Amino acid sequence: MPMRRLCTIYADRAVDRDDLFQDIFLAVWRALPAFRGDASVRTWLYRIPHNVALTWRARDRRRQFRESPLENEIDAGAEMDLRRLALKRAVAAMPPGDRTLILLWLEGLSAAEIEEVTGIRAATVAVRLSRSRKALQLNEVMP
Amino acid sequence: MSDDAFPLRALWMSDTPVDDKEVTSAVGHVLEKDRAARARRRQVRLFGVLAVALLIPLLVWCAAYGVTPLVRGAYALMAVGCAVLIAAEWVYLEWSRQALPGPADARSQLQQTAFMLARQIRLLKTAPLWSSPVFIGVGLLAVWLYQERTHTAAFALCAVALTAWIAAGLRASSTCAKLNDQRLEMEGLLNELQ
């Protein structure tokens, strides 16, 4: 499920989301034998999808210029869906670095765990997350 | 974390769950497709290796028993060129494999991928140079044809070799430009993550 949510942020079109999901799943599958237990399973499992998503996005720059049909897949009648859509759009519009951090935070990871996943110091993570959350509130994602 | 942060997480996590059956079937489909793609790639590589493996001894034999020193030298160069081509292909594939996203942290992963891409770019930039023995060998055969047989055949062979050399150089250059774009994108991401 976190992988699916990640895909909706990095890939605009449904077909690209499926491609990205497949790439992520395969990368996790192939990396499984290399897991030695020197990191927690949780952070280890988050590292691969984020690495795949970042490199996937960089691999084909054309994807970044496609229109974003995110709203087509949301039931516009539900208030929750509209707010979730606003959140997704705000996160998708963030610079890649901030987007990676906020995605991990939204998934419930602590600053220390985000450091393990991204390699960015926990103190820096906390500062940047605070800035990003403020930006999300300014975007009126939350009432 | 501030109190107002948690509704954001709750909102994020409230995304419509995907049906388990759908995920299982997608996963099965992915594995099946991957198995088929890998089998296909293995076959293509095996065919390539077999073709060159057969070609190299033949070229070496021609280099040993050619009619003149010029012809022997030409075949020897072509044999060396083929061996270099195989080595370059193997190195390129190995670097591609090392650049694949793995379980390292995002910064280390991006650094490694950018580093591997830079290596691949250098390899491709020098492609016309390290593939030259094959084409020079064919050129020497054209010289022999010019001296001993017909001029037309010599010119035709020379034109084919030159066209193939230029085409290989152009292809390497276009792949190089694509890889360089990727590398710049990786470095941009890396700066973003600093």
Image: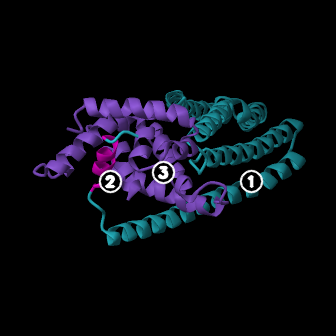
Chain colours: A purple, B cyan
Measured as percent of width and height from the top left, residue B194 is found at 55, 28
Q: Circle 2 is placed at which residue position?
A: B13
Amino acid type, mark 1: Leu
Amino acid type, mark 3: Pro
Dot 2: few (<14), some (14–19), or many (≥20) neighbours within 10 Å? some
Q: Quadrant of residue B4?
A: top left
Q: Residue at x 68, y 29 (%)?
A: B126
Left or right for B75, reference A54: right
Number of the front mark, 3 or 2: 2
Measured as percent of width and height from the top left, residue B109 is found at 59, 41
The answer to whether residue A95 is visible is: no
Q: Nearer the viewer, residue A45 or A124?
A: A124
Q: CA distance from mark 3 to mark 2?
A: 17 Å
Q: Nearer the viewer, residue B23 or A129?
A: A129
Quadrant including the N terminus of chain B = top left
Q: Quadrant of residue B140?
A: top right
Q: Circle 3 is placed at which residue position?
A: A49
Per the rendered image, the range of residues in magenta is B4-15
Which chain contains the residue that carries disc 2?
A: B
Q: Nearer the viewer, residue B150 or B84?
A: B84
Q: Is residue A70 above or below residue A93?
A: below
The residue positioned farthest toward the front in the image shown: B3
Amino acid type, mark 2: Met
Number of the front mark, 2 or 1: 2
The label on residue B72 is none
Q: Circle 1 is placed at which residue position?
A: B55
